[in-house]
């Protein structure tokens, strides 16, 4: 595979290790990191990220799908692998075969599994207000009945917070109610003689804003990759971005005042303008709605502005006054303030999670510190 030809993501695994060290400092005593590496580790490369994490002693992972979990096993990733999402009943045999942990999405799902001949390990998801998946915290008898199913070994129980990234009073109150309801279910089950096993509640912002909770795991994703919004976090962690998105200068030209750039002629030069064409487009996951939004890229230490509509495979940048030549490397997402993932994502009216997990297949990954 040709790696640095056109567009590539440098994945700095030393920074990943650094971030893990920082996260460990704020994790409560006796609580471990469960590394969330779904969606190709948010675009960072799931197997390589898991290998690095294994090598630094992380052995609890969460993925979204059965396929992701099997890929980890096939690549000899060791430890516990929790599937956070729904697995089709007809594929439950693979949960047993590959020694995975399946989330029980509700009581109905558990009942269906009870009719199979496979024995699986499971964590029960409790719905405390997110209303996505999980058996409701209100249905204690349903939850208790899951524990009674012979071929489902319940080794954990968890919930997911829906507004843990907000410091608004109402949202904090709601989060605390979610947390209380989860713990009281766990207590009730214990009183009924059931062991809820490993319990976990927090994802990244849950950890940043409620780091004192007594849990067995924190399910961290985005902060491992070095990204969070400081304004949404009461703890300010010092993190390093793991991913840097780069492309090449395909061509440099000068256009006259009045000339347009790209489809639709939406950008018209007001003066003589030096234009660089860059080898990345929306098919690579660089959002098309960043066209004509004053979004910047970094070339040879200077910022150039994206002009005209972003195309499928290329985009154009105003590089007037910047020393640029064909073949130069351009950074589109990186550690610098003007091009950090949060900034680019918000200019595109989305979040860093969507931006990074949406990077395209043509973006080759180049690993540092593997
Ligand atoms: C994706 C996900 C996480 C990780 O969230 P971050 O905000 O990236 O830390 C944790 N738990 C569940 C259930 C998830 O779906």
Image: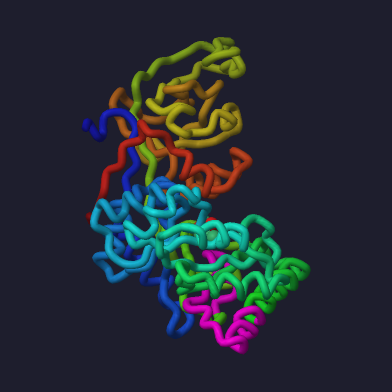
Q: Position of residue 171 (x, y in %)?
A: 73, 66
Q: Is residue 121 left or right of residue 12?
A: right
| Number of numbered discs on residues | 0
Depth check, front residue: 307 or 355: 355
Q: Residue at x 69, y 58 (%)?
A: 131
The magenta stretch is 184-211
Residue 77, relative to residue 123: is it above or below? above
Looking at the picture, tell me which residue is in the foreground, 68 or 362. 68
Q: Position of residue 260 (x, y in %)?
A: 56, 12
Q: Is residue 335 visible?
A: no
In terms of image quadrants, where is residue 18? Answer: bottom left
Q: Is residue 104 magenta?
A: no
Residue found 62% across the figure and 72% down from its top = 143
Residue 148 percent across, percent down from the top left: 54, 74
Viewer-proximal residue, 299 or 187?
187
Q: Decide if residue 145 is in sight here.
A: yes
Observer-nearest residue: 123 or 333? 123
- The quadrant holding residue 186 is bottom right
């Amino acid at each position: 595979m040709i790696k640095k030809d056109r567009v590539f993501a440098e994945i700095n695994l030393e920074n990943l290790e650094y971030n893990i060290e920082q996260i460990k400092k704020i994790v409560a005593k006796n609580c471990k990191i469960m590394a969330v590496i779904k969606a190709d580790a948010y675009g960072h490369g799931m197997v390589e990220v898991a290998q690095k994490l294994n090598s630094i002693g992380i052995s609890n992972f969460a993925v979204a799908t059965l396929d992701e979990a099997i890929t980890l096993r096939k690549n000899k990733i060791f430890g516990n692998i929790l599937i956070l999402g729904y697995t089709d009943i007809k594929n439950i045999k693979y949960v047993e075969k590959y020694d995975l942990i399946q989330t029980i999405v509700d009581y109905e799902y558990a009942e269906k599994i009870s009719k199979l001949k496979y024995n699986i390990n499971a964590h029960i998801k409790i719905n405390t207000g997110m209303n996505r998946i999980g058996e409701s915290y209100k249905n204690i008898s349903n939850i208790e009945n899951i524990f009674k199913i012979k071929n489902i070994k319940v080794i954990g129980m968890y919930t997911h917070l829906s507004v843990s990234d907000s410091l608004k009073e109402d949202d904090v109150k709601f989060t605390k109610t979610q947390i209380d309801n989860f713990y009281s279910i766990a207590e009730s089950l214990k009183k009924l003689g059931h062991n809820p096993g490993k319990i976990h509640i927090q994802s990244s912002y849950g950890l940043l804003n409620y780091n004192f909770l007594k849990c067995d795991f924190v399910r961290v994703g985005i902060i491992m990759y070095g990204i969070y919004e400081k304004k949404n976090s009461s703890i300010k962690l010092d993190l390093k971005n793991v991913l840097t998105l780069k492309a090449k200068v395909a061509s440099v030209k000068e256009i006259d005042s009045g000339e347009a750039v790209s489809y639709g002629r939406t950008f018209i030069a007001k003066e003589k303008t030096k234009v660089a064409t860059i080898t990345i487009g929306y098919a690579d996951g660089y959002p098309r709605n960043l066209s004509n939004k004053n979004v910047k890229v970094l070339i040879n230490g200077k910022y150039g502005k994206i002009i005209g509509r972003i195309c499928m495979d290329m985009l154009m940048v105003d590089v007037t006054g910047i020393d640029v030549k064909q073949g130069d490397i351009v950074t589109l997402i990186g550690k610098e303030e003007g091009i950090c993932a949060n900034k680019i994502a918000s200019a595109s009216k989305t979040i860093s999670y969507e931006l990074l997990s949406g990077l395209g297949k043509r973006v080759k990954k180049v690993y540092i510190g593997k």
